[in-house]
Image: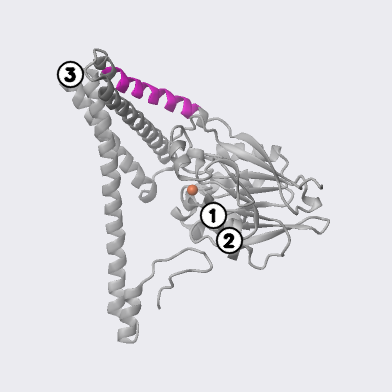
Amino acid sequence: MLIKSFSAESGKKQRPCNYREFLTVIFGHDLLCIQVIHIAYIVFWMVARMLIFFFIMSAVLSLACAYIARRIVTVSGWTAGHKGFVYSLAAAFVVFELAVFFAQRRWNLPGPLLDGMQWSSYFLLGLMATVFLYLVVGDLLLVLFRLFAGKHAIMPFFARFLPRAAVLLALVSCLIGFFQALQAPRVRTETVVIKGLPHDFAGFKISHLSDLHIGAPNGAGLVESAVNISNGLDPDIVVITGDLVDGTVGRILPKLAGLKNLESKYGVYFCPGNHEYYWNYEAWMPAIEGLGIKVLANTHHVISAPGGTRIILGGVTDHDPDAAKAFAGAPTGAPRVLLSHHPALLDVAAAQNTALLLSGHTHGGQFFPWWIFLAATHKHYRGLGGHAGMHINISSGTGFWGPPNRFMIPAEVVLVTLKAPIAS
Ligand SMILES: [Fe+2]
């Protein structure tokens, strides 16, 4: 049997297998030897991809850690023994990060042990990344000072002060960010004016959750907190724009049980994010539906008010998103709201007459100063904005991913209220 390049049901793209089709056409049918070659091909690419990824990951981590260790021992004035200790610590960190990365995917470790390893791993990774970035900025400043101040008497002071200040600032920001990450999400309220909004939907309240990342390293506590906050807003619908989970169904589903307590008048809706694909998309979609949440994967749902008027709520997948397919067959004339995990769908969503696009994914940068990179590469990366007559709300995330750090960018639940234009 030939492998399809696209599964219309799941919306997930699969690897095309042209050489197999070619050989089958040549020999007339799917021979056993072709099947053996096909299996060997798949195994080879699995191993090769893993080795390439392992090599790149360990090389990046090692280089960053070597740079940090070298800068620390250079300015510290420590003895050879202490220097050896710093380098050993850096090497141990790299080994630990790689071990946790593979442990969470390959090894069946007890839940609490894996949770503890993930918390430590992500905290240290965030610390390392922040120290690295601040040190690079400090060193760039030093280069500038050397260019302009030359051999001024103050230069030796700068050479010692800047790297130390960078490390100290990184440590303080990580510590504050850690405590901010432990706080309950804040509520951000937005009102959007929708052209042609039926009278029945004036004041319609959408509770927008996104990127809870339950499993790495958030747990049932965050679910409970988000549910309580959302219920307190008395929403008409609740939407979750992807990246709900970070782990297998077997390990994470019990932590999501609290989502069954989400309250709303017209239901709870979900569109998949990239992380749902990392942890078996096909297994997660029915599991999420089992929590009483309607999955919108390149499809839509018509929300009808008691008065008979309607709005259309569409949702797209993260892999192969198709906004046209999502709204196919939807009643015309009703305002459209689209859920898309990734906010890059601005033009596509606007072309489908979407009135409001709800997205996530960016985490608003998650912690200072990473938002600077997002601001440089995205038209919208956080908060409420507009594009081609369409409103867009990008959640900064209700949880966090990776490093437990929310320095200056708090997690949030967004309450979006729809409003009709004032009649002239
Ligand atoms: Fe994402």
> What's the residue at 57%, 60% (across, down)?
297
- Answer yes or no: do the residues labelled 1 and 3 have beta carbons within 8 Å? no
Depth-wise, is mark 1 or mark 3 nearer the camera?
1
**Which residue lies under the disc numbered 3?**
79
Q: Judge from the rendering whether residue 262 lies leftward or rightward of residue 376; answer left or right.
A: right
Specify which label sits upstream in the sequence, 2 or 1.
2
* Foreground of the two, 166 or 403: 166
Q: How is the image coloured?
A: one colour
The reply to whether callout 2 and callout 1 are in contact (CB within 8 Å) is: yes
Q: Residue at x 54, y 33 (%)?
A: 410
Point out the tag, 2 or 3, that comes first from the N-terminus.
Answer: 3
The reply, left or right, for residue 289 in relation to residue 172 is right
Q: Quadrant of the N terminus?
A: bottom left
Q: Is residue 6 above or below residue 232?
A: below
Can you see residue 218? no
Q: Name the quadrant containing residue 326.
A: bottom right
Question: Range of the magenta residues?
Answer: 160-179
Q: Nearer the viewer, residue 392 or 315?
A: 392
Amino acid under label 1?
Leu
Residue position marked by numbered label 1 in the rendering: 345
